[in-house]
Image (spheres, rainbow, N blue to C red):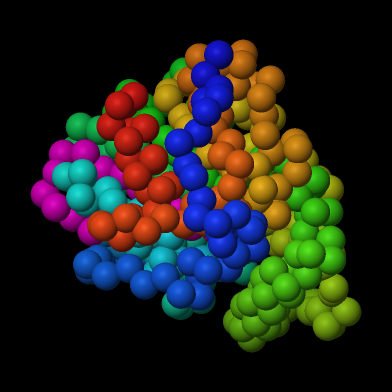
Amino acid sequence: MPIVKSSEYSAALFFRNAHAQTVYPSVFRKVDGIFYSRERIHTPDDDFIDVDWSRVGARRLTIALHGLEGDSGRSYMRGMARAINRRGWDAMCLNFRGCSGEPNRQARMYHSGETGDLSLVISRVLADDQYDDLNLVGFSLGGNVVLKYLGERGSGIDKRIRGAVAISVPCDLGACSIRLQELGNWAYSRRFLKMLRRKLIEKKTLYPDVMDISTLDSVKTLSEFDDRFTAPLHGFRDARDYYQRSSSKQFLGGINIPCLLLNAADDPFLTPQCFPHDEARSSSSLYLETPRHGGHVGFVSFDANGEYWSETRATQFLAETC
């Protein structure tokens, strides 16, 4: 029954506000001391995935996955990579298709349930036989991908993949899409839509015959965007089909390695469905930790090393259980 009943995270007074936790790191946090080396991995469908390495010469690797419209340069990715390196492990930050600063070659991009690209990257890494142990860390959308990947593979997962941490994960995509339409989340939705619209317009110039974006300006919510564009581009009937098939919650029972799901109770993006207590109680591998505060990909703290609590907690979990 791996539910962490008493989380050690204690937020400073100002950061007991969920929106302060969510906004502050993306606006004000700077993470120094990380110097990436980029590698391009070519895919079987004539596309590419760019990954950024931060190596210390270890035999243990942690792969980090970013959230919606993020990339390896986000402070939470750089902060996690730095924390990983400090523990003496190599870090790789995976940029989803189209998120590395250059449009990907195919009409398709990435989405919340796309585990094939992660599988490809892992297979390439393990085939090189440079690592004895491999861990995964995913944030938000990337966390959903990590959980789904682990659940899909179940007991058949490669034995060198020892553990995982998923942070601020929308385990139920349909419920979270409704939550993001609430007035209190308007600014987040507007920002995501602005970034997604820009990317789709750019993609339209490359694939004028594949995409009809004539209704793009009328899209007001992320669920409308997913219904009109994300779903058909990636082989789903509509947004409902996309959310239903891609949500990680239904795959949690298949997880067969130590995995920490770290979702703050005050996360403004998440709904009760994203706190899978029943699944954790019935699992010997899924650890659920729900600190009272933390916002969405927040968990701000001010220690001497500049680490946020989620980075310390994630690396602690991986070191102790894996």
Q: Is residue 13 left or right of residue 207?
A: left
Q: Quadrant of residue 68?
A: bottom right
Residue, far left: 57
Residue, far front: 13
Q: Is residue 77 above or below residue 57?
A: below
Q: In this view, does 57 lie above or below 190?
A: above
Q: Is residue 212 visible?
A: yes
User: At 26% from the left edge and 57% from the top edge, which residue is drawn?
Assistant: 304
Tell me if residue 64 is in the magenta stretch: yes
Q: Is residue 127 left or right of residue 149?
A: left
Q: Quadrant of residue 212?
A: bottom right
User: At 41% from the left edge and 48% from the top edge, which residue is drawn?
Assistant: 309
User: At 56% from the left edge and 62% from the top edge, which residue is drawn?
Assistant: 14
Instruction: Give whichever of 168, 192 is nearer the camera.
Output: 168
Instruction: Give whichever of 285, 13 is nearer the camera.
Output: 13
Instruction: Give whichever of 128, 133 is nearer the camera.
Output: 133
Q: Is residue 54 above or below residue 314?
A: below
Q: Where is residue 39 in the image (x, y as percent from the top left)?
A: 28, 64
Q: In this view, does 99 lie above or below 114?
A: below
User: At 43% from the left edge and 47% from the top edge, which residue is drawn?
Assistant: 310
Q: Can residue 128 be seen in this view?
A: no
Instruction: Give whichever of 39, 275 is nearer the camera.
Output: 275
Question: Which region of the structure is painted magenta?
Answer: 54-69
Tell me if residue 244 is in the magenta stretch: no
Q: Where is residue 7 in the image (x, y as percent from the top left)?
A: 50, 33
